[in-house]
């Protein structure tokens, strides 16, 4: 099998300064791609990651702050990338948010916030990216979804609804952009251990998660990042409109009990 070589490719990762997004940035850089890291508020973390990647892999790395649910900020973000990178070949819509709230207690503003970041954000970013990719002869858009695009969960009605919408958005987008040489895929992680949730998992009981997951372990950020990089490569050039679940078969077990 050919090795994944993305040298010269220009990649934008939204929400790329922490967690899964940060590891996606690292893995793209390790494959030779230049990376543009989008962050929301924490510029310092983004710059620390950019310096780490630059020193480790010698690729071009830049950072840009934006709220992906705000159309004006998204346009400014892409203009920043135009200046820093010159083009875009891969967009990873990774930025997301969630809270756990009962539907009867949820404020309208919280419903809007979660839907806007998780669903409107990918629309705004994909539109900007696709216009550029069309002029460049093609590209790849990867939407980071969740097993909760299919598996319901109490307290996450807003998040699950947004991710279910993102799943269909990805499929429709793949149809609309296929003739322009742009592929679109959805990558949906299950339970993934990150620096942000490690303590919470420990308090709940890591062993409980591992008992629930058929493969017997929690996912790691590298499991998601490696899949994303593969999906962006020419090795996956006939995969379009697909949903890729990274969950150790947990979703299939969940569906049995619904």
Image (spheres, helix red, strand yellow):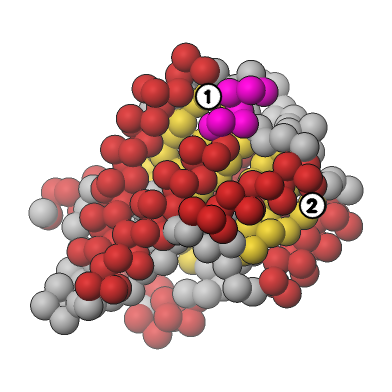
Residue at (47% x, 14% y) in the render: 179
Q: In which quadrant will I find the C terminus?
A: bottom left
Residue 91, horizontal then vertical, whole percent: 58, 41
- Segment tinted magenta in the rendering: 130-136
Residue 61: give its label: 2
Q: Earlier in the sequence, mark 1 or mark 2?
A: 2
Q: CA distance from mark 1 to mark 2?
A: 23 Å
Q: Determine if the magenta segment contains residue 226.
A: no
Q: Is 163 above or below relative to 32?
A: below
Residue 221: give its label: none
Q: Is residue 248 left or right of residue 61?
A: left
Asked which secondary structure carries label 2, the reply is: strand
Residue 190, horizontal then vertical, whole percent: 37, 55
Q: Is 219 above or below relative to 132?
A: below
Residue at (42% x, 44% y) in the render: 123
Residue 205, horizontal then vertical, whole percent: 37, 79
Residue at (56% x, 58% y) in the render: 73
Q: In which quadrant will I find the N terminus?
A: top right
The answer, for residue 69, to whether it is visible in the render is yes
Q: Is 167 above or below relative to 115?
A: above
Q: Nearer the viewer, residue 146 or 198?
A: 146
Residue 182: give its label: 1
Residue 119, horizontal then vertical, whole percent: 36, 52
Q: Nearer the viewer, residue 190 or 127?
A: 127
Magenta stretch prevailing secondary structure: helix
Residue 173 location, quadrant:
top left
Q: Is residue 39 left or right of residue 252?
A: right
The answer, for residue 189, to whether it is visible in the render is no
Asked which secondary structure carries label 1, the reply is: strand
């Amino acid at each position: 099998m050919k090795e994944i070589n993305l040298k010269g490719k220009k990649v934008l990762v939204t929400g790329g300064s922490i967690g899964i997004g940060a590891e996606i940035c690292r893995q793209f850089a390790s494959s030779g791609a230049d990376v543009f890291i989008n962050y929301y508020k924490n510029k310092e973390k983004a710059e620390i990651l950019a310096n780490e990647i630059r020193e480790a892999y010698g690729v071009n790395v830049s950072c840009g702050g934006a709220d992906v649910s705000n159309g004006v900020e998204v346009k400014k973000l892409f203009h920043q990338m135009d200046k820093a990178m010159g083009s875009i070949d891969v967009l990873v819509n990774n930025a997301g948010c969630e809270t756990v709230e009962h539907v009867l207690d949820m404020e309208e503003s919280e419903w809007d916030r979660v839907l806007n970041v998780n669903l409107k954000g990918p629309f705004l970013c994909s539109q900007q990216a696709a216009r550029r990719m069309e002029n460049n002869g093609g590209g790849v858009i990867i939407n980071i979804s969740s097993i909760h695009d299919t598996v319901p969960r109490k307290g996450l009605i807003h998040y699950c609804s947004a991710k279910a919408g993102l799943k269909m958005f990805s499929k429709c987008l793949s149809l609309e952009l296929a003739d322009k040489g742009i592929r679109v895929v959805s990558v949906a992680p299950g339970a993934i251990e990150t620096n942000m949730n490690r303590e919470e998992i420990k308090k709940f009981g890591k062993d409980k998660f591992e008992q629930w997951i058929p493969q017997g372990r929690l996912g790691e950020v590298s499991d998601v990042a490696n899949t994303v990089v593969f999906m962006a490569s020419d090795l996956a050039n006939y995969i379009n409109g697909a949903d890729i679940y990274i969950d150790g078969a947990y979703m299939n077990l969940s569906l049995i009990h619904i």
